[in-house]
Image: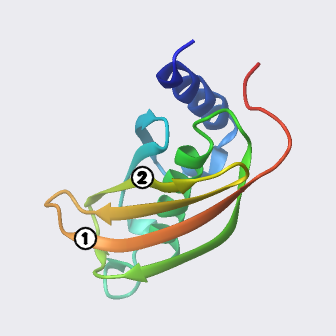
Amino acid sequence: MTDDDVATRSARAMWADDHASRGLGMTLVRVEPGIAVLSMPVTQAMVNGHGLAHGGFIYTLADSAFAFACNSYNQRNVAQQCQITYVAAGKLGMVLTAEARERHRAERSGIYDVTVRDETGTVIAEFRGHSRAIPGKLID
């Protein structure tokens, strides 16, 4: 089995149980070893009184992309630390895309950067997550 096969199968196993991401309308666009891309439409339920999506929903999209990227090696991982910087707000009807990329990976830890953009390419948020491996595999 190739590394890409492992990443794809690991993502499918995670996606099957990821009711939160699916419930928010996220789509798993692409996964490769150390990389994951997810998209999510900004719906009426996600915007505040100014008609903007800012904060928790954007964080959740970035965190989901981070999770798929750091679990793409069939080694179970959890978030050890995450931080996000909001650059702009999403707007109703936009489709946001989060791309997670591995910056560093060691035996039990990893660092991943996630950029969230709208469909015009405007950066909405920058996220950095530190992962920690825990016992277990996603697939046999």
Q: Which is more toward the observer, 122 or 4?
A: 4
Q: Earlier in the sequence, mark 1 or mark 2?
A: 2
Residue 105 point in image, percent of width and height: 58, 52
Residue at point 44%, 44% (across, down): 36
Residue at point 61%, 35% (across, down): 73
Q: Is residue 91 left or right of residue 71?
A: left
- Does residue 22 appear anywhere in the picture? no
- Does residue 67 appear anywhere in the picture? yes
Q: Is residue 134 left or right of residue 88?
A: right
Check disc 2 and give the amino acid type: Arg
Residue 95 point in image, percent of width and height: 28, 55
Name the residue tied to disc 1.
123
Vertical comparison of 130 with 18: above or below: below
Residue most extreme to the left: 120
Mark 1 falls on what kind of element? Answer: strand
Identify the image quadrant of the C terminus. Answer: top right
Residue 67 point in image, percent of width and height: 59, 51
Q: Residues within 10 Å of mark 1 (few under 14, many from 20)?
A: some
Name the residue tied to disc 2.
101
Residue at point 39%, 75% (across, down): 47
Q: Residues within 10 Å of mark 2 (few under 14, many from 20)?
A: many
